[in-house]
Image (cartoon, rainbow, N blue to C red):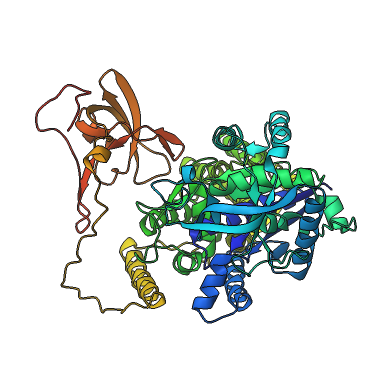
Amino acid sequence: MKNYYITTAIAYTSGKPHIGNIYEIILSDSIARFKRYQGYNVIFQTGTDEHGQKIEEKATNKGQTPKQFVDEVASVIKGLWDKANISYDKFIRTTDDYHEKQVQKIFKKLFKQGDIYKGHYEGWYCTPCESFWTESQLVDGKCPDCGREVKKAKEEAYFFKMSKYADKLVEYYNSHPDFILPISRKNEMLNNFINKGLQDLCVSRTSFKWGITVDFDSKHVVYVWLDALTNYITGLGYDESANSDEKFKNFWPAVLHVIGKDIVRFHVIYWPIFLMALNLPLPKQVYGHGWLLQDGEKMSKSKGNVLYFDDLANVFGADAVRYYVLNEMGFEDDGLVGWELMTEKINSDLANIYGNLVSRTIAMTNKYFGGKVENKNKVEDVDNSLKEVVVNAYDKVAKKFDELKISDALSEVFAIFKRANKYIDETCPWVLAKDENNADRLQTVLYNLCEAITIGTSLLNVFMPSTTLKVLKMFNVDLRPSTNIKNFGETKQFSVVSNAEVLFPRLDVKEVLKTADEIKQKQIAEFLKENKQEVKTEVTNKKEEPVKKDIIDFETFSKVELKVGTIINSEAVEGSVKLLKNTVKIGEETRTIVSGIAKTYKPADIIGKQVVVVTNLAPRKLKGILSEGMILCAFDEETEDLSLISPIAKFKDGCEVS
């Protein structure tokens, strides 16, 4: 049996993680479950990052010790992971005694061998990101990562000699082309950081106390990444003194680190260099996934639009939320999430495609054969077409998992259910039931449906573990193991439940949005309370003051390039109820632009229409499609009316708008 060690980034205990944070954990869980299903001996590690100035400040503001504060938050995080049915094998906390002692040993070793030295740091510091920046790295005088204010800081610190290992790291990249995925992340690291020359890394602080003490210089605490990143080896029982646990010897190097694209730099530059300095092998792959974005705007507690897993699960169910986020996020793309988007997707896929298939099959099996069917082998060509889709699904799913294209793997599973629904329409069991001479053929059809559902549901289990076990119980069968998942016809007889539970009742979007608004108001009230502001009762007949956005100067506005274009083709984006893929002619060039206008416009309505396009906007992938610009629209938030902005008179494509 092969060993497989997979990790997530550890969650920072400054507060409750939102749905974008937990997406990574659900993604990693599906991979871990599938590898176990394939027969691998898996260790799946996740956990919490619990040190730092930000936590020290938050604890002080709450009148708690830092340890009391992180104990509370870690408990919340672990509770969310459990609610999401995360099958972790190890939940590490960086306040664990073993981890802290090993970090002290690692720090001392690297100091003794000359990789760490003492110096002074002077520069700009961002407390929320816990990052130092030089003057040239700031963007408009603010943190380049989060855009917040930075403070001038000068203090004694220890530094790691990153440049010492830069050439060795580039050599490793070149000899291991699949080390960083997607490949675009590797190019970004080379162009933005390594090729410009690596600066030595600050690895200790003296301006706060909440951290792992440098045991040979007690006024210093170990700073962020040397503490946080080493969890991947201390969690397996690594011991710098050469007394490592057997688990470490058997499972390191990790097969896969799963992280967000915002922390790729730390995992593919700092972490490999630390490991090289410790003379340890590097992880086989680091996958930097995209972000799950709130539909249309950035999540903010002050706006009340932060989406938390538990809130979503209370409305949709944990498995439905798992399905949505895994389906929505492509291999290297960002995804969109929102109450309305989730409602529509769950209704269309889980209620209509999967839930309806299960309930129809059980109902017909009960109606026509008293709940029991077996294979009568009355085969027709249409049966072979269904079986081909079903028996080939496992290999397709496995290939997509190997490529880390988890959304595509989920689509391959749902291809079974879509084909089974089509099979019902093709065979018309209700017509066969009218003639007793067709009894064996009818039983064969229903058997095939039960078998297709069994195999498809067994493959779906890694994505939706609770629902699938419930469905298999309805058919009185066990989870089909991977060793015979490709064998159609394994079950001798199906004996289904007499009354099938509705797996996914259709959701009323108005009711969902009503609940969402209640959650929003509660969030805003909590935010105001936390920030010691007066909570005012909302007056329903008083219009909200419009949010005033930052004033920009003329020079900034002049950078925006607006041109007239004509939509020459438009089509719906598969898997989205909101997006249209438009082909727009702008002067001599033609561009693809994805727009969220499908609720207002059908593709045929806008072909030939002239629109105003932002042409110098950075390209961005949506649902796997590279969108090269933005089509401008007017939108009324109260009525949700939307209208494309078009010139009144006919203009030549490519004309500038000013």
* Residue located 84% across and 56% down the image: 240
Q: Position of residue 241 (x, y in %)?
A: 88, 57
The residue at the far bottom in this view is: 63
Q: Looking at the image, which residue is at 52% across and 68% down?
A: 15
- Residue drawn at x 60%, y 57% is 25
Residue closest to the eye, 213 or 84: 213
Asked whether residue 627 appears in the rendered view, the answer is: yes
Q: Nearer the viewer, residue 563 or 566?
A: 563
Which quarter shows the C terminus? Answer: top left
405, above or below 152, in the image = above
Indicate whether 14 appears above or below 275: below
State left or right for residue 261 relative to residue 51: left
The quadrant in which residue 229 appears is bottom right
Q: Is residue 130 left or right of residue 201?
A: left
For image coordinates 16% across by 35% down, the residue present is 646
- Residue 225 position within the rendered picture, expressed as x and y whole percent measured from the top left: 65, 54
Residue 215: x %, y % from top left: 77, 66
Q: How many marks?
A: 0
Relative depth, front residue between 68 and 5: 68
Furthest residue to the left?
A: 649
